[in-house]
Amino acid sequence: MALDTRSDGPRVRFAPSPTGYFHVGGARTALFNWLFARQQGGSFLLRIEDTDTERNRDEWTEGIYGALTWLGLDWDERPVVQSERGRLYSEAVDKLVAGGHLYYCDCTREAVDARTRGAATPGYDGFCRERRLGPGPGRALRFRTPDEGSTVVSDLVRGEVVFQHATIEDFVLVKSNGAPLFVLANAVDDMDMGVTHVIRGEEHLPNTPKAILVWQALGGPRLPVFAHLPVLVNEKRQKLSKRRDPVALEDYRQQGYLPEAMRNYLVLLGWGPADGQEIMSLDDMVRAFRLTDVTRSPAFFDVRKLTHFDGEYIRAMSPERFIEACQPWLESGPWAPSAFDPEVFARMAPLVQERVATLAEVPAMVDFLFLDRAPIEEASWERAVAGDPAAAALLDDAIASYGTCPWTAEEIRGATLAVAERSGKKLAKAQAPIRVAVTGRTVGPPLFESLHLLGRDRTLDRLRAARDRMPIVGPDLID
Ligand code: GLU
């Protein structure tokens, strides 16, 4: 399919409905639209589809703006808000009524169900088609779909998808309370906004022939090109669901994922770069992205891969940027604000940066430096201290050695190596009880630097406190 070559470039839109938390699938759709617009020198428009007054909330609309801004997806022109455009939809309805494309219908759902139970073709049976009802309370407006022939959706991702008209019911465009329905507002706006490419989730494919019929009935100019993006699934290959899966973009943001990592991960959901180089800058994405290479098969939303990407992005940061990005997480750390020492953190930061996958993991890596006593994780204690018969003697030896060795990371390492040798353990194994006693956990930043930064006195205090929790060791227990 040739791309639009008009000098003003293609016009695409992202058209979310503010009916809930902004979904990662919505973010992927927004990104693909944005990349296409930026790559083609076109416009990326934003439209808030808030015609469902019962389900919309202002905070969800704010959430959409906030999410796009967080992801760095800037939009062109003033956002279009459907709830402000009632007149446009009424004019379109008048035109459709005048053209004989709509008819009033007063069938209740129950009546339709009773009549069509067991029918070969599902949906409305055209009962009111020829009744020539006028407007009135309880009457909806239905679109008169052609009985024969078909509508072909020309889709950049899925090819030509043919919908037989016989399978498309006379669908409602205006509810009995006068509210325009999705297909009407959506098609009228795409026409009015001069949209050239409709890029959206695959779940909208069945709506597309209806939108095309409405578009044609309104005498719209050239139809947009469609591109329906593959559905996102979880590891069980089930479509991602709001109730079952972690889909809210905001949750990822709050868990400390970086927008760059999220954006990079999202671009791979249904598309991949030809050279296989998956970690890519936004500029690279703009250059390499091809709407025509988007796949049809469902895309697995893999949180582990996203987390891996996040770690890669964290490690690629400059030390200064990393420290800056950590600030919101440090402000809510478990220590007293006055106990936090930015200089100590700055010295530890490069070691932490190497080891975290998300920023939310940072406080737990450094809390032992700023808490009076690092709370000891029971499972770690059981595994590395209580469960190790040699731990008590080893800690006693460490207390004695650390009491006298010069206090540099290198010297602490040397002293610990000697402790390890005396206990018959490898250095890595010997570190475990010391680390748990001092930091509370079995994992964390490198031990010798950690002890050095913590200081001799606090290190010894914590080792002694750990020893106090344990039985006294008799000489016969030491080899
Ligand atoms: N408002 C629709 C949705 O949130 C999108 C419609 C479209 O992109 O055409 O799913």
Image (spheres, rainbow, N blue to C red):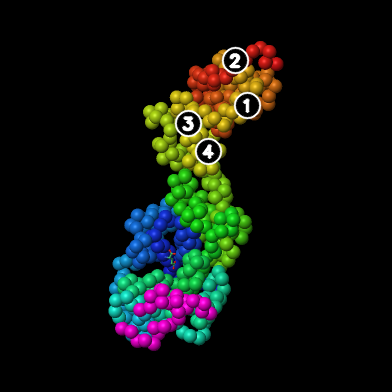
Numbered tag placed on residue 353 in the rendering? 4
Q: Which residue bears the numbered disc 1? A: 387
Q: Disc 2, ligand 1: is the CB inside 8 Å? A: no
The span from disc 1 to disc 2 (Cα, nearest Å) is: 15 Å
Q: Which residue is mark 3?
A: 367
What number of labels is visible? 4
Q: Earlier in the sequence, mark 4 or mark 2?
A: 4
Q: Are marks 1 and 4 in contact (CB under 8 Å)?
A: no
**Residue type at tag 2:** Ile
- Do labels 1 and 3 touch, CB within 8 Å? no
Measured as percent of width and height from the top left, residue 99 is found at 36, 86
Which segment did they paint magenta? Answer: 106-134
Examine the rendering and report whether any part of residue 410 can be seen: no
The residues tagged by marks 1 and 4 sit, at their Cα atoms, a distance apart of 31 Å
173 w.r.t. 245: above or below:
below
Q: Residues within 10 Å of mark 1 (few under 14, many from 20)?
A: few
Is ligand 1 less than 8 Å from the beta carbon at label 1? no
Do the numbered discs 1 and 2 sit on residues whose CB atoms are within 8 Å?
no
Q: Residues within 10 Å of mark 2 (few under 14, many from 20)?
A: few
- Residue 76 x/y as whole percent: 38, 63
Residue, disc 2: 472
- Determine the residue positioned at 64% across, 13% down: 474
